[in-house]
Image: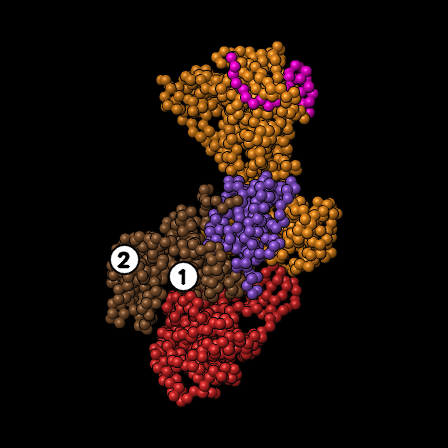
Amino acid sequence: MSENYEPNIVAFLCNWCSYAGADLAGTSRVHYPANIQVIRVMCSGRVNPLYVMNALQQGADGVLISGCHPGDCHYMEGNFYARRRMGMLKDLMEFVGVDPKRFHMSWVSASEGHKWKEVVEKTVEEAREAGPFEGFRRRQIDW
Amino acid sequence: MSAMLLNKEKWPEFIGKLTGKNLWAPKLEGEAMRFAPVAEDEVPELTDGNTRIPPKNIVFPQTETMYRFQLGDFEMKEPELKEEMILLGIRPCDARAMVIVDKLFSWDVDDPYYLKRRELVTLVGLACSEPGLNCFCTSLGGGPASTEGLDLLMVDLGDSYLLETITPKGEALVSEVSELLIEADTEKIKMKKKMVSESEGKIKRSVDHKGIPEGLPGLWEDPLWKSVSASCLGCGTCTYLCPTCHCFDIQDETEGFEARRCRMWDSCMFEEYTLHTSGHNPRPTRRERTRNRINHKYNYYVDKFDVIACVGCGRCINLCPVNIDIVEILRQVKEAL
Amino acid sequence: MDLEQLRKTAAEVVVREDVKYLIGWKQGSYGYRVAPVFVEDASGAAELLFSPLCTANLATYLTLVEKTPLPRGQEADKRKVALLVKGCDSRAVTQLIVEHGINRDQVIVVGCPCPGVVDTEKLAEKYPEQGKPAEVEWNGENFVLLCDDKETELPRDQFLAEKCRLCRHPNPVISDITVGEPVEPWTLADDNGVEEIEGKNLEERQAYWEEQFSKCIRCYSCRNVCPLCYCQDCILDRLNPTWVNRAVNFSENTAFNIARAFHLAGRCIECGECERVCPANIPLGKLNRKMAREVRDKYGFEPGVDPEAEPFQASFKPDDPEDFIL
Amino acid sequence: MTDKPKVGVYVCHCGINISATVDVETVADYALKLPNVEVARTYSYMCSDPGQVLIKNDIKEHGLNRIIVASCSPRMHEPTFRKAIQEAGLNPYYLEMANIREQCSWVHEDMEEATAKSKKLVASAVAKVRLLEALESKEVDAEPAALIIGAGIAGIQAALDIADAGFKVFLVEKTPSVGGRMAQLDKTFPTLDCSACILTPKMVDCASHPNIELLSYSEVEEIGGYIGNFDVKVRKKARYVDFDKCTGCGDCAAECRVKDRFPSEFDQGMGKRSAIYLPFPQAVPAKYTIDPESCLYLTRGKCGKGPKCQEVCKAEAINFEQEDEIVEFKVGAVIVATGFDPFDASRKPEYGYNDYPNVITGMEMERLVSASGPTGGKVKVFNGEEEIEPKEVAFIKCVGSRDASVGNEYCSRVCCMYVAKQAHLIRDKIPDANIRVYYIDVRAFGKGFEEFYDRVRRENVRYIRGNPSEIFKRGNKLVVKVEDTLTATPLEDEVDLVVLGVGLEPRADMREIMDLLRLSQSPDRFFLEAHPKLRPVDTATEGVFLAGCCQGPKDIPDTVAQAKGAASSAMIPLARGKVMISAQVAEVDEATCRGCGFCVNICPYTAIELVKINRFGHEVEVARVNEALCKGCGSCSAGCLSDSIQPKSFRDRQILPQIAALGVLK
């Protein structure tokens, strides 16, 4: 692993809680690592588990999915579906040898700017520990 | 054409001389053999049986990059093919299959990718002493020691290999290892003949294709197609493992804003193979697809190139998950004629 | 197994006016092969077979049959389809009902209680296949191979198929007609079939699956044979968007296999067909069994046993595990 | 869709908010190299009028058909730019924003890193915008009626405003009477108006207003639908008294076999009521209610020889057979005005609220000083068994407010003033009392507050800075143990009465409303408004508004102001008579749908159903979306195995290229 390796994290945030929470972190000028890039979706339930696979395949070293706290989903239940799907995916990914440190899920509400920072820090730190993702990365393979 | 003898004691030395030249040989991986590069210091053992995946991927890779480009840009970068290779231990049926496929790839236009790879490869065949359960090469003009398509044929005579050169490529190869070889005497030639005829005798399955190419059009609507295809899963096993199947699809694959155009094996047994953009599918069910597979091999190809596009390697029979057996289908076709 | 009774029952079913055909097993063209057969009349029923070689899950044919466009004015054939099922196969039927893949009243399920089938690969390794079709029968605990007028006892613990060692439902969970006596469920194997992989560390797992997935030739037989892979248009065939490139390499093959296994999470009924048909011998069953076990242990759900169940992937419990949440 | 995408990328400096950390010129230069990007510019304030004009002109001049604005959060200005490009003739959904302010320049310090990240975010936006589709918003009729939940002063004021404007109002109140917390207060600070005197007329108005349907003793059970078309189900709880027949004479309560046995909710448990009761004399509606939990007949099935109330009621209004009634109606907007709970003083056990009857809360004090209260307005408390008029009175402020140990970090905003008011009232009623107020800070920020505070101090009320640590009994005195932090003197102050200036808390039952309307909480656990400054009465759920203390502690004038604000916001769809429904809804590809029904199961809005269609002669089931019900969350899509249901603007084919752009570009 190179000394100055910076993990590349793709995050999927629900519009109502986590994206708003990340915005709040901005408004509050809370600083956190720049390794994370956010894709906004309306609900964590929108995140197709295969996005995670796809992100790793296409160059992400880590993936984060964040939604509203259970019971607080703007769409009532979306985060429950997300939780079940991601729980299953995590088991599967680990089984095929993907480091669980590359994959995180969190509940961050619209008011938890500070929690967002902590979540990002943890995600980046763990992805850094896991090192560059080489597993089934598309480019590794004669592309 | 010359016949030389390689004592098996010199086998490692023989291999040693070739490994630097991009040598490939059958290798047991897991439960099945497949062609794989031979590493330095590695001495492959040639055993009975054939590779599960035919060596067609050596000249016709399952996925081949045609060129690369940037989205929104017209500049193309083509790959360069230049490395020569030696394919050691290819079975006569598979070599013969390449000759059959050559006709297609050099027919109306010359396919640069395929023909270049063909030019770069030297095929060193290995005659079969123990044919497989479902081999029927002898029914189709091949045989355990058929030389068609080979540059060099090796025949296992117990303590030595008989090496018969067939083409200048084969001769060139032999000349590089000539110090390991001795001239084969008539005794050895006789031994070979005996081995070959014994081997032919072990082939239990056969196809009587007389009249089939001409007769197939008449059976277009025959109920047999429905019954033989009813259990078909529509998977690509038979075609992907067939040494003469050569269909491909062309796809653009992107990653970010970069892209490549590539071609990859396709199978006429897949539903999308003939699916039109409109949603219409001229071969809507597995019946039409199965009928096409048989017709392509035993009728259309004969029409166009005067040869049956089947070499009797038996792979499709061995590996069909639902026991669809081409020999059995052809028997029914023959019966229906 | 009383084959006469099976054939008689089948004959009675196929002659019914509201029945299109019966799907069963018949002897194959050589060796240990058994082929699926579509019986349309009483005479065809005489070919039927039920033996330890009948591994194929025929439920896949319920959704495999193409619905081609009908000429104007022509009615779709709405007759029922009858099929023979083992315990595991019957779970596929149940799961298809849950998922609206089939209508319950469109199928006639002929249940065959199953004492377990043989692993034909292991069998062929020990007793190579012959050109002539061989027979295998159940004989008490064990199997017996009938070949060339010779009877060879096949010890159950050596030849029982992997999926059967872990089978929880040897008797059909759904059936309209049952042929044969219910069998006593046996003690499950101690291991869960995936411990071997779970015992590896991440690098070893990665290496193991890299080797396995690299072998994949993307023939899609695993998908096509699966009774629960019945989408009109599989996402793995899609180009817009492209989830998985058609290119055959370790990366795409892995993506393909992850997607396949994930889509079957909470749906796979562990019939083992994907693994059986794979021409590259990829241990696909391990992926499915792993997911099935997690679904059972962590979420308390077993697919294909209750036709009234809510689909696992389309439901949740407020207390689903969330120990992985940051 | 047929036109080749021509993308314009607009990178905003946001003054120096972005450009101090992100090299915006570099980002624009980079964007220009991305596929289909025709124009890339920077500007100091993209959202300003000249900024928008810049975009509009480019659309016209360069024929741009996709726009990316790299600036602040789309939650801030997406509507602004959608409108701008629409004005230039583009479909408003051909817009994508790259959030390089809240999620980049404001959270990263290193210019190189922030610039690199901005490039990726722009690239990801380009990847998506190329594949966006034009969407048309649809208009549907809006029901010209509003639902107001809670009939305290906030609910009452909002109801009156909306009803006066000519719209129907359904005012739902959980308790038997409207009035809420304000009805319990004696005087209001700082003007010392009689609370009841100013509230009662409004209570009466809202009961008699022809446009208001008052549903008291009722609870909202279900709210479905969406802005303009909410379907509401309300449970009218059985009063066991015929609403129309009851004359409110009170004979029943006087004769009740368990007369005055139960603590009166209205009097904070200090007074008593019967099983059949009117919460307070001015209650509206003036109809009696039988409490099913205390009535002998309802709890035991037997009440003497027969229920007395039934016997004495001349109007024959008592009806033990009465059952809950479900009322269903439609409204176009909803105002939540559910109020607050006073802090439960027993959660500060060191103050002995549960142990000593002469430790009381501010709310109890309100009842005690009220002429209509349990003591008729006389300040009398029990000290042990003995009823006394307290001479030594201590107030403690910030009980349950500004106190992380009970989870309430916020200031309750009213306690400073109500304590001052109560001190003044005690001074009025017990002129020789020694009154002191223990405080942390005095916050007298409102109109007339500081003046009032000054007045009270001049009335010989001592303000001692200190936060008491304990209250215990010594002899027949309560001892307040406290350190005067101005003089650093520990005190043990002996008093007769302690009034705890309890703060305001979110209602214990607010979860029910959250679930009904899909509202969120802010960190203080009150309802979360859509924007703390610019949309203080809106919520994240369109058509649902907040009024009063349910959104956070506030005094009466603020509550009334917010109620009026909420009423005016709620009236927008009602007055227009139409609402736009989101165009970003899910769509089914019927050609590939396998009809498994997973999406039907998943959809929390029952917006999807399976329908039978004819597919080339075969009857098959496929999913179909009711666009008016769909909220576009996309949960269905992630659960669809064949990818056949897709939320517009968030389709897989739009998101996957975003992922690719973020992953690949280093």
Q: Is residue D92 above or below residue B311?
A: above
Residue located farthest toward the top when viewing the structure as drawn = D432
- From the viewer's perspective, is residue D498 above or below residue C261? above
Colour assigned to chain D in the rendering is orange
Q: Mark 2 vs mark 1: which is more N-terminal?
A: 2
Q: Position of residue B310 (x, y in %)?
A: 43, 77
Q: Residue at position x 40%, y 68% from top?
A: B320
- Amino acid identity at mark 2: Val
- Residue at the image point whose x is 26% and y is 62% from the top: C3
Foreground residue, D315 or A56? A56
Chain ID for red: B
Q: Residues within 10 Å of mark 2 (few under 14, many from 20)?
A: many
The residue that label 1 is drawn on is C275
The extreme bottom residue here reads: B186
* Residue identifier under label 2: C179
Q: Is D320 covered by the magenta stretch?
A: no
Which image quadrant is residue C101 in? bottom left
Q: What colour is chain C?
A: brown
Q: Secondary structure at mark 1?
A: helix
Q: CA distance from mark 2 to mark 1?
A: 28 Å
Q: Residues within 10 Å of mark 1 (few under 14, many from 20)?
A: many
Among the 4 quarters of the image, the one containing residue B236: bottom left
Inspect the magenta stretch and tell me whether residue D467 lies in it. Answer: yes
Which contiguous range is marked in magenta? Answer: D447-475
Q: Nearer the viewer, residue D285 or D371?
A: D371
The chain shown in purple is which? A
